[in-house]
Image (cartoon, rainbow, N blue to C red):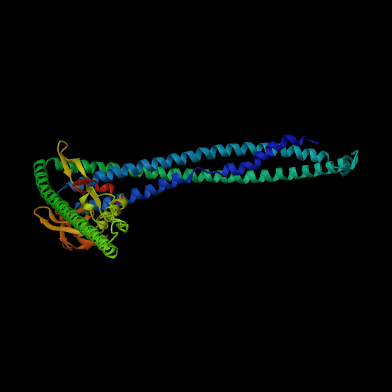
Amino acid sequence: MPNLKKFFPLIFILGLLPALLHAQAPQLSREELEHRKRELQREIDEANNALKDTKKSRRESLGQLRVLRDKIALRTRLINNINEEINFINGDINSAYRDIKTLEKDLDTLKSQYAQLVVYAYKNRSTYDMLNFIFSAQTFNDAIRRYQYLKQYRDYRRRQAENILETQVLLNKKIESLRDQKQNRSSTLKQEQEQRSVLEVDRKEKDEVLSKLKGREKELLADINKNKKDAQKVQAAIQAVIRREIEIARKQAEEEAAAKRRAAVAAEEKRKKEEAARKAAAAAAATAAANAAKANNPGNATADKPETKPVAEPPAPKPAEVEKPARTENVLEATPEALALSESFESNRGKLPWPVASGHIIGHFGRQQHAVMERITVENDGVIIGTGRGAPVKAIFQGEVRTVAVIPGGGSLVIIRHGQYFTNYARLQSVNVRTGERVSTGQVIGTAGTNELENLGEVELQIYKGIQKQNPEFWIRRK
């Protein structure tokens, strides 16, 4: 009989082998790559549509240059994403090669061991030998153990044959998977090469537009100065409205505080009067009682003078305690409604909707380097969003319209208050709301203005916390 103990570790390993070989690399990263690839392609398609619109203008514009640069950046990210995907595929291919080598080696080992078992079984195929092996046992229990041993040996041979078949099937699947991975890598490499070719075309087009724009620096500089003056007008109007709101809120808070003080003084005076009246009544009652006792006992008035006890005075009522709001330091949140609106606005940081249904940021918040003249910087008080001509503009949060104005050179302006926060919508072509009107989230408040040079609509969104500017990109949701 062969020594079956030496085969038990191999059987255990073969039992785990299918589970080990079927374990795959984490799919989440691959799914994230696929999702990011789709998102980048969608953004590239949007940039292509925007480029078509800007090309309708008669001359090269900053919009064309901006869209081309955005396309180049997006396509570069897409190429990097494809390269990461290729690295994953290469890892899968290398893993498949290793698995195939391991399976081939294990299959050869199983076949060799199974051949030895078959040879031994052939040499000991006589039924007489097997019965002799059983009946030569010295005890009945020993005979039972020998019978079970032979039975386990037959089962082991059967499992060896099944393991050979399973390993062969698994090997064929791995070879097929390797073939698919190679085809996938070939297709992905082709995509990467195509994207690189398109990237070179985009770069050449960008260089041509940039070269033509540099020849118009004087015209561009004049536009920068004009836009700066228009932005200053809009900013001055917004600052004036916010300061006026703060002043109105401060006066209202002072009037309410003065009214509370007057009410407290009146309540205190009333309490003192009531206390004096109670004391006078108590003294009068004590005097009347003493006179009555003296009249009843004229001879012994002093000895039989009844003992008078002072009348207990009721405790003075405590003034009602007024609950202090959590943020009384801000006059713009003096009322519970304003405080709740501020807290609700803050809780939606990073989740606020865009003011337009479709669009992209063409001017970021803060100081930015000019797209053509590197020595020139421009300052944006909010974000400038490019959209369709005449596109509806919506309120990004519920609140009250505090100002509707027309700024020469800056289009129409709508300012909506949300507690201590203000959202400002500038460069509007038309307005659908009035001062004092309450608006809800997503309500249309006007239409986007038109940028004739770039042949697109645009709206500028600004967010203020009191008089402090905020970066709207931190507040609106990411696309």
Residue 43 position, x and y percent, is: 31, 50
Residue 119 in the figure: left or right of residue 189: right
Closer to us: 386 or 67: 386
Check the picture and name the quadrant holding the N terminus. Answer: top right
List x then y, in percent, for residue 370. 17, 41
Res 155 quadrant in image: top right
x and y percentages locating residue 45 in the rendered image: 30, 52
Q: Is residue 389 visible?
A: no
Q: Quadrant of residue 14?
A: top right
Identity of the residue drawn at 73% across and 34% down:
6
- Report the residue at 26% width, 47% height from top: 473
Closer to the camera in the image, 366 or 389: 366
The residue lying at 13 percent from left, 52 percent from top is 244
Numbered marks: total = 0
Q: Does the rendering let one see residue 4?
A: yes
Q: Quadrant of residue 192?
A: top left
